[in-house]
Image: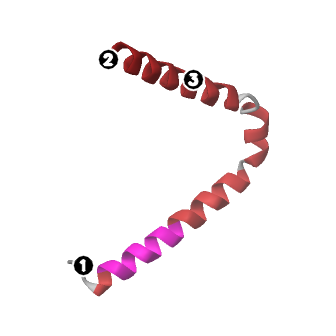
C-alpha cells in the first residue's frame, strides 16, 4: 500500500511535528498560565451541555 520511502517520511514527519509542538508549547508556557487560567470552566460547560443534550434525547425517545 505504501512504499518504504513514504513510511520513512511519515515517521520522520510525525517525530518532527510532535517535537515542534512540544517546543512551541514550552516557549509559550508563561503566556498560557497568564491568559488561560479558567479554561477548565469552558471545558466543563461544553461537557455539561453535551451530557444534557444526550440525556434529553434519550428521555424523549422512550
Query: Which residue is identified by label 2?
Result: 61
The image quarter containing residue 35 is: top right
Residue 10 lies within the magenta run: yes
24 left or right of 16? Answer: right
Image point 55% across, 64% down: which residue? 18
Distance from Cα at disc 1 to Cα at disc 2: 46 Å
Magenta-colored span: 6-16
Residue 50 image position (x, y, % from top left): 48, 25
Looking at this view, name the residue that lies furthest to the bottom: 4
* Disc nearest the viewer among 1 and 2: 2
Q: Residue furthest front?
A: 62
Q: Residue 2, position in %: x, y?
A: 24, 78
Mark positioned earlier in the residue sequence (3 or 2): 3
Alpha carbon separation for disc pair 3 and 2: 20 Å
Q: Is residue 49 left or right of residue 2?
A: right
Q: Residues within 10 Å of mark 1 (few under 14, many from 20)?
A: few
Q: Residue at x 58, y 62 (%)?
A: 20
SS label for mark 3: helix
Q: Are marks 1 and 2 in contact (CB under 8 Å)?
A: no
| Magenta: main secondary structure | helix
Residue nearest the viewer, comparing 25 with 37: 37
Image quarter where the N terminus lies is: bottom left
Q: Which residue is mark 3?
A: 48
**Which residue is at a point 38% across and 82% down the rendered structure image?**
8
Q: Secondary structure at mark 2?
A: loop
Q: CA distance from mark 3 to mark 1?
A: 42 Å
Give the image quarter of residue 53.
top left
Amino acid at each position: 500500500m505504501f512504499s518504504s520511502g513514504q513510511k520513512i517520511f511519515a515517521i520522520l514527519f510525525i517525530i518532527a511535528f510532535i517535537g515542534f509542538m512540544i517546543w512551541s508549547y514550552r516557549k509559550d508556557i508563561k503566556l498560557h498560565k497568564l491568559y488561560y487560567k479558567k479554561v477548565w470552566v469552558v471545558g466543563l460547560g461544553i461537557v455539561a451541555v453535551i451530557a444534557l443534550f444526550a440525556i434529553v434525547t434519550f428521555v424523549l425517545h422512550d
